[in-house]
Amino acid sequence: MLDDPSNRRENLLGITNSDNSAHFLAHYHHDILSFANRRSTLNEFHCKPVKNGVANTIDYHNLGALCLVDNT
């Protein structure tokens, strides 16, 4: 998932809140991914830059590259 090039900025349609306030949804052309909306615990994947990246128009080629960006 992290290295999948289909999860890049140009394929991101938007970010929405999920029914569960602990998560947010990233809508891509091919899929909808759920991310923790809180600090990472118990090996849970958390990527705050996904949510911030939309507002700041960060260009990324996959989620792995995005998570390396310091966008706190």
Image: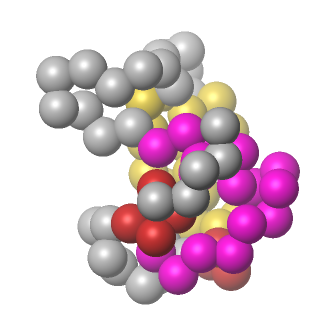
Count of marks, rendered view: 0
Q: Quadrant of residue 51?
A: top right
Residue depicted at 56% across the width and 58% down the height: 69
Reply above or below: 62 against 55. below
Nearest the viewer among 65 and 21 is 65
* Numbered range of the magenta stretch: 47-63
Nearest the viewer among 40 and 10 is 40
Residue depicted at 16% across the width and 22% down the height: 42
Q: Where is the N terminus found, in terms of image quarters? A: bottom left
Residue 63 visible in rendering? no
x, y percentage for residue 70? 59, 50
Question: On the rendered structure, is 36 left or right of 37?
Answer: left
x, y percentage for residue 28? 57, 66
Residue 9 visible in rendering? yes
Question: On the rendered structure, is 2 left or right of 51?
Answer: left
Reply above or below: 36 against 54. above
Q: Is residue 61 shown in magenta? A: yes
x, y percentage for residue 3? 32, 76
Report the coloring of the rendering.
secondary structure
Residue depicted at 30% across the width and 40% down the height: 45
Q: Residue furthest left?
A: 42
Q: Quadrant of residue 72?
A: top right
Reply above or below: 56 against 17. below
Q: Residue furthest top?
A: 21
Q: Is residue 70 shown in magenta? A: no
Residue depicted at 47% across the width and 20% down the height: 38
